[in-house]
Amino acid sequence: KFLSVVFGQSSPGAGPGDMLDGCDSSQFQTDLCLSLIDHTPLGFAVECVIFMYAFAGLAMSADHLASAMETLCDHWSIPEDVGGATFMAIGSAIPEITVNAISTCQGVVARNRKPTPGTRSAVSPADLGVGAIIGSGLIAFLLIPAVCAWCGRKGRGLKLKLGPLARDMATYTTALLVLLHCVTHGVTVSSSSAMLVIYLLFILFLVFFKSCKRCIFGEKREIHRADSIFRENASQRLIEKQSGLSSFASEGGGEDEVVGEEEKTGLLSTLLCPVQLPIDATCPNCSLEAGDPAIEKWYPVTFVVSFAWISVFSYVVTIVADRWVALVDDPAAMGLMGMVIVAGGAEIPDTVNAVAVARKGYGSMATSACMGSQIANICVGLGLPWFITAVAGAPPDVGSNDTFLLVASNTQLYNVVLVAVCLMGPCAFARSPKVVMMKRRAVFFFALYLAIVGTLTYMTLSGLFSQGGR
């Protein structure tokens, strides 16, 4: 009776066993049986807890996967440019990529069921992944540069190299135009393969650009390092962590404050232990920071197991988001959910890392890495699963039931053009090789992000995107 009252059983005489009987294997595969509880406030609260734990597990698993990829690049002696643009970029974008892959598969299944417009089944789960990747692009081009400029060294602002910035923006804009074509005309083999070709050309440019530059301008070759750049970066991160702890204690951080920080960390670890313990137990710590060659050789195991965990948590995130969209009863809410919630949660680690690097005076490197990872988001995160499903004859439905993704894609395209003009325009007039972004421009970027997200949220909740489909 307690469960019947708490979870809102419609039948007054039904007991808890009746509610549990409704959760069979088919229902569990469809929505994890969440449809039995999410029509009550307590059931919605349970879903929120599941969603947050899934996001925490996604971040922890992605951290293990990034460590495995960094160790792979070190052991295979992969050049910095190639490793950074391929393995490290994909590792950074793996939450959005996996969420899109899972949602694409669910979208194909939902499409084969021949949904009826206006019903819950008319919602395409594939919109969640596309919305997440568009939202990540908004954060990478607006919030992360703004935060780096605000938190960087005083009076210096954020300095970006013009060449890499123009290269990344041009490539991302080209990929975004292909995405816009897919949203407008549907996913095809040619459009999805174009995304993969764009990424391949981007990698080839990175590989051969330095060699061509040396041949044309006669530049000297780089000095051979005893250790790879990935191992040097890992050693530098370890030194920064140790120096950060000592500087906190020496710069006014008394014993009480240190104990307070440890208590906060301990409380957070206790809350997250239900997901952290199984992940850490099954994923060997093969990071280069650990400095244990005997464990580093286990990076293939860490790669496979962490990717499996990421797939599980991405599936849970997609299911919960689908249930919330069903409660809102608006197909456009799926894209908004991805753009705001999934993208926001996935980009938090990148933003925190960018701030830490910016305070050391390397904001340009962090910002360029975040912008470059968006190319992998679109070309690999969307292009690869779309190409596979299109070749199989079952391309996903993207934005077919509403116009949210169409408006959001166009908005991001205009946003990239505006950012390029704001950053590279003054630089071109001054004929300077570097772009300088001060706090005033950072405030403008931050306000622009809030305006875009706020406007799209208001239009979605007002039902403006669900009046006529594509």
Image (cartoon, grey):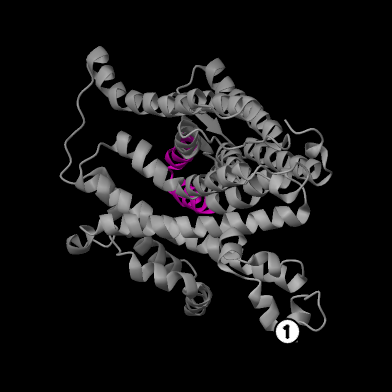
The verdict on residue 360 being magenta is: yes
Q: Is residue 392 above or below residue 96?
A: above
The verdict on residue 290 being magenta is: no
Work out which quarter of the rendered image holds the C terminus and state it.
top right
**243 or 444, nearer to the observer:** 444
Quadrant for residue 207, please give it.
Answer: top left
Q: Secondary structure at mark 1?
A: loop
Q: Could you tell me which residue is drawn at 48 percent across and 21 percent down?
A: 432
Can you give x and y, in whole percent of width and height, for residue 243 in the image? 36, 62
Work out which quarter of the rendered image holds the N terminus and state it.
bottom right
- Please count the marks in the image: 1
Can you give x and y, in whole percent of width and height, for residue 142 in the image? 60, 38
Q: Is residue 12 visible?
A: yes
What residue is disc 1 on?
15
**249 or 442, nearer to the observer:** 442
Q: Main secondary structure of the magenta part?
A: helix
Highlighted range, magenta:
348-375
Q: Is residue 120 above or below residue 187?
A: below
**73 or 212, nearer to the observer:** 73
Q: Could you tell me which residue is drawn at 26 percent across and 12 percent down?
A: 216
Identity, as a three-letter code, of the amino acid under mark 1: Gly
Quadrant for residue 180, please give it.
Answer: top right
Q: Could you tell me which residue is drawn at 31 percent across and 39 percent down?
A: 83
Q: Residues within 10 Å of mark 1 (few under 14, many from 20)?
A: some
- Of all residues shown, which one is farthest toward the top? 216
**355 or 392, nearer to the observer:** 392
Can you give x and y, in whole percent of width and height, for residue 261 in the image? 50, 73
Q: In the displayed structure, does residue 105 sit left or right of residue 47? A: left
- Of all residues shown, which one is farthest toward the bottom? 1
Can you give x and y, in whole percent of width and height, for residue 458 in the image? 80, 44
Q: In the displayed structure, does residue 167 sit left or right of residue 65? A: right
Q: Is residue 254 visible?
A: no
